[in-house]
Amino acid sequence: MDEKREFDFEPEGLIEEAEPAPYAKQWFSDDYEKHFQETDSTPKSMTVYTPKQKKKKGFFRSPLFVGILSSFLTCCLCLGVFSYYLYRGGNQTSENVLPLPGEALAAAGYGDRIKQMTTDAGQHELSIPDVYDLVSPAVVTILCKSPSGSYVQSQLSSGSGIIIRGDGYIVTNNHVVESATEITVNTIAGQSFPAKVIGKDSRTDLAVLKVESETALPFAELGDSSQIRVGEMALAIGNPLREELAGTLTVGYISAINRSMLIDGKPMTMIQTDAAINPGNSGGALLNLHGQVIGINTAKSTGYDVEGLGFAIPINEAKPIIESIIKHGYVTGRVVIGIEGQTITEAIAKANNLPVGVYVKTVLPSSAAEKGGLQSGDVIIACDGESIKTIDEINKIRDTHSVGEKMTMRINRDGLELNVDLILQEEVPEKEATPTQAPVTQTPQQPQQPFDYFPFPFSWFGW
């Protein structure tokens, strides 16, 4: 058994409990706060997080109100734009040529550059590429289908035309569409339209067509041909030879103005230019450097030794014809006698024992000539007391009269001289009107008239 033993010695290595140093501070629980106050004099603050209270939004700051207001403003803007264009379009009458071709070009997708060129054109001359960019969309190809007398049922021909109004009016030459039964208009933008003839005028070789388009078409601005001078640059745009060459540009100069020409028996006053023009250019545009149409290309001199002789109808002479055709379908106010005649030269007169004058070949039915008593075989030797020798002299005297006025003719009928009074009528074209020839009694045989020609032959461009 183990017994409890008592030791009377102290084990080695034991350390007696040291007494606290005299300077040591005694800690008591009540001294804790006081101790920290003595050791740290910085005042302490406590931050308490309190969640923000959401403010109640008013109606004017709500998304619903903002949406309603935005929709209202958008509708007002759209309505204002629509009303502006509607009012503007309603004030454009069919009798007025649209003033700014750049607007139609921009509407067709040609952009701000075309608008700028249109503005610049009225202020100063444009570069040749800019003139082409501005006007070429308004120059079109005209394809015509005409009946043929051969085994082929129909024949195709082509020419050029100029869009002169955004609502689809096109001017071209009469000889391009004269015998056409079907007409198609193609633009360089790839559009194709069937066209109808509004009216034609064989005297001036002009015709007006109309196409229907859902959008405004680019059109050319008509200039002032009275302001052109010999030596100014001239640009011709058209479709020479065939449709594959559509939109061809040629450049030259104004060679002469006020040329009096006899083309296919029709006296015409023309602009002469050396800008290259060829068959198919008929009805195309002759332009100045402002991008304005100053002439309608019509004819050229043909010959192996001829070069640079092209002719255009001055636009100032074409304007009243175009406006009258658009408004009435024909040229109003023109007087007509109602005969078909032939000039009798001195050689013909001696060979046939006739006086020099104008031989009446045909008297049109219901015409002023028929009502006045003219007959086939009569020879007109004077009009209104003035001696005449050619058809042109009769026409000049006729054109001094108005519709309803009296014109007195001195005629030779079978050797007797008579006075015939005619009440002039207005020339109104009739569709498919075929003049019939009255029976001729005791009419002298008419020999072939000697050919009086200009040194160079001229031809139309339609083919």
Image: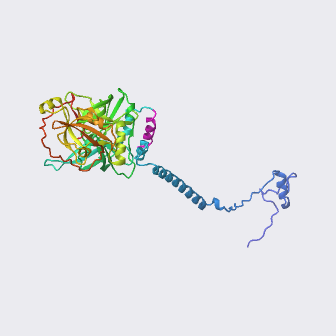
Magenta-drawn stretch contains 118: yes
Q: Position of residue 136 (x, y in %)?
A: 35, 40
Taking the image as drawn, is residue 282 in sight?
Answer: no
Q: Position of residue 145 (x, y in %)?
A: 23, 48
Q: Between residue 304 and residue 36, name the one nearer to us.
A: 304
Looking at the picture, does residue 89 appear above or below residue 119?
below
The outermost residue toward the bottom is 1
Q: Between residue 15 and residue 394, name the one nearer to us.
A: 394
Q: Quadrant of the N terminus?
A: bottom right
Locate residue 250: give its quadrant: top left
State which region is magenta. Answer: 110-123
Q: Quadrant of the C terminus?
A: top left
Looking at the picture, does residue 334 appear above or below residue 11?
above
Left or right of residue 128: residue 429: left
Taking the image as drawn, is residue 406 in sight?
Answer: yes
Q: Position of residue 167 (x, y in %)?
A: 38, 48
